[in-house]
Amino acid sequence: AAPETLSDSQMVMVIDQAKMFNFQIDDVDRAQQNPKLMAAAMREASFALANEADTFLANLIHAGVPAGNTLTEVDSNAVDGTEDERVYRALVDLSVKLDENNAPSAGRWAVMRPALLGKLRKDARFVSFGTEANRAVAAGAAVGTVAGFNILISNKVPNDAVESDPQILAGHNMAVSFADQIESLEAYRPELRFADAMKGLHVYGGKVV
């Protein structure tokens, strides 16, 4: 058979998100021997930028889920078993949905809010059988991989629009692209102030492909 000719078609991902930080440290504080203040402020700024990007990605992925790939608790037979078992049932059903969409098994992820992860940690299948992994989870370790998903946690996963219940976002690495860069990072002395200042610009964008 003749070799397949690969397509060179392209998809455009627009980098249209930008967030900045800008703070100053008075010379009086510097004189009072606070050399770690700048480093602490930079860590706080970094966390704030990551939090904004996390919100953007969660909303982007949620909006990109096709209607046919949205499952409810009814699909997971929520009437059976305990409430703590529902999260595992939902993950199994989401895994089946990805199988039906021919998604590769390696590279799957599921993101949930802390409340749902807490229910997963109370599921007897992960804490009650005395294995080394069960004991680690009971001691507070990450649940790790469940139903083929690498489990992630985020407070930015949207709630259900109708019931206000927390949702689980599940997918595969090849489904979403994200790019970001610290476009500018500048230390300066503000005019009319006796202070050191730092400002930076974070640009990013994503696409459900």
Image: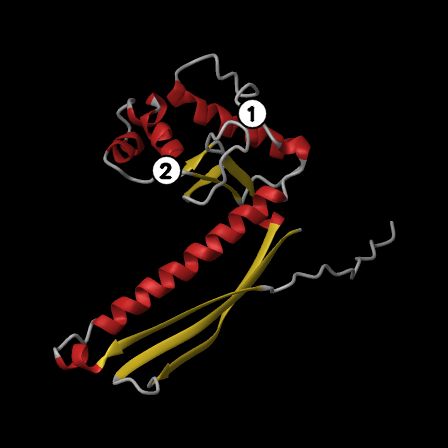
Residue name at image x 36 percent, y 65 percent: 45
Residue name at image x 67 percent, y 33 percent: 67
- Whole-percent x and y of residue 184? 47, 77
**Horizontally, is 89 left or right of 40 in the view?**
right
Q: Hey, which residue is sitting farthest left in the picture?
A: 32
Q: Amino acid at mark 1?
A: Thr
Camera-side residue of 187 and 82:
187
- Whole-percent x and y of residue 22? 38, 72
Which residue position holds label 2?
114
Q: Amino acid at mark 2?
A: Pro
Camera-side residue of 130 and 137:
137
Which residue position holds label 1?
72
Q: Does residue 191 sit above or below 58 in this rendering?
A: below
Callout 2 environment at 10 Å: few (<14), some (14 to 19), or many (20+)? some
Q: Does residue 171 sit above or below 177 in this rendering?
A: above
Callout 1 environment at 10 Å: few (<14), some (14 to 19), or many (20+)? few
Camera-side residue of 149 and 208:
208
- Whole-percent x and y of residue 97? 61, 30
